[in-house]
Amino acid sequence: MPLFSTTWSVKGVSVEARQAAARAASADGEDLGAWLSRVIRKVGEAELNPAVAANAPAADSRADAADAKLTSIERAMLRPGNGLTGNVGSA
């Protein structure tokens, strides 16, 4: 049995985060699924092996730009008083 199906649903993602991801994917010329796959894979690899990620050359400027966008979005979402409490960081 495969680990994942072709359809995937994630609960607890705010509307703002979904819209930001859709805008970033569009700006990069990708569909949302491809963009999310790339960003999740890159961030996941960095989380699992930060030493390798820190020493790796910047391979994809679009991915780097997307990471910067996500970091900015995450910071905004974590600010107190943004109306998003309870939606951030919950799995």
Image (cartoon, grey):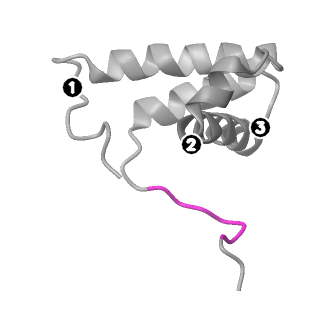
Mark 1 residue element = loop
In which quadrant of the rendered view does residue 88 lie? top left
Q: Earlier in the sequence, mark 1 or mark 3?
A: 3
Q: Amino acid at mark 2?
A: Leu
Q: Is residue 46 above or below residue 33?
A: above
* Contact (Cβ within 8 Å) of mark 1 with mark 3: no
Q: Quadrant of the N terminus?
A: bottom right
Labelled disc at residue 31: 3
Name the residue rendered at 71%, 45% in the picture: 33
Name the residue rendered at 73%, 25% in the picture: 26
Name the residue rendered at 70%, 44% in the picture: 37
Mark 3 residue element = loop
Q: Amino acid at mark 1?
A: Gly
Q: Which residues are magenta?
A: 4-10
Distance from the alpha carbon under mark 2 to that under mark 1: 31 Å
Residue designated by label 1: 83
Distance from the alpha carbon under mark 1 to that under mark 3: 28 Å
Instruction: Residue 83: give x, y in percent of width and height.
Output: 21, 25
Q: Is residue 6 above or below residue 31?
A: below
Residue found at the far bottom of this picture:
1
Residue designated by label 2: 48
